[in-house]
Image: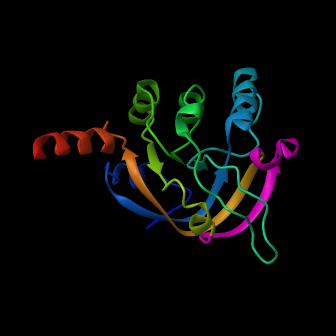
Amino acid sequence: MIQTPLDERAVLELRAGDAVAISGVIYSARDAAHLRMSVALERGEALPFDVEGQIIYYVGPTPAKPGQPVGSAGPTTSSRMDRFAPALHAAGLRATIGKGYRTQPVRDALVEHRSVYLAALGGSGALLSRHIRSASVIAYHDLGPEAVHRFEVEAFPAIVVNDAYGGDLYEQARAEYALVQ
């Protein structure tokens, strides 16, 4: 179990391959929101939320059904945010959640800024949304589902793919599989 916001100590305890359950507040942002945040950082402007110690989930949730905080909330492909991720980690972001591989510059930024990349299971958006207790749009309302949301989550499941030491679950699994053949 990890609780947000994350501090350096909590991040340094995580290793590639660890399963985690996240409770607390996480934020959503996808391509368009990342572009706007990147421009804000370049201009020296404030971001729509303080990223220090926070987690960004790469998701664009579907509309909520009556009585639910969000609809389906499955991860999107993380590599689409890779050109923006190093600057956000330099600003204090501690983790991101998505699916798929990260580029080497992102992996380097995770080590440099003591951050982690977590994966959520693609195709499981309906199940993942059950861990979101509340949701509200806090920025970029005009982006619809790609707006920045503030989610309160309880035991949100993820797996550490890239840790703050350079560990990579995908590389570890490929190496292990190669030994089995």
* Rendering coords of residue 131 (x, y %): 59, 70
Q: Is residue 172 above or below residue 27?
A: above
Residue 57 in percent (x, y) is at: 60, 50
Disc tally is 0
Q: Which residue is drawn at 33% across and 57% down?
A: 18
The picture quadrant where one finds residue 38 is: top right
Pick the residue in front: 109 or 65: 65
Q: From what the image shows, is residue 111 above or below residue 127?
A: above
Rendered image coloring scheme: rainbow
The quadrant the C terminus occupies is top left
Which span is picked out in magenta? 130-146
Q: Which residue is drawn at 55% across and 60% down?
A: 4
Q: Quadrant of the N terminus?
A: bottom left
Which residue is located at x 68 percent, y 61 percent? 151
Does the magenta run of residues contain 34? no
Q: Quadrant of residue 26?
A: bottom right
Residue that lies at the very extreme toward the front in this rendered image: 181
Position of 104 with respect to 127 (left or right) is left
Give the left or right position of residue 82, taking residue 72 as reference: left
Res. 44 image quadrant? top right
Is residue 139 found inside the magenta-colored segment of the image?
Answer: yes
Q: In this view, does 133 lie to the left or right of 46?
A: left
The correct choice, above or below, for 13 with respect to 104 in the image is: below
Q: Residue 138 appears at what percent x and percent y?
A: 80, 51
Residue at 32 percent across and 48 percent down: it is 16
Judged from this view, the residue extending furthest toward the bottom is: 67
Residue 157 pos. (x, y %) = 48, 64
Residue farthest top in this picture: 42
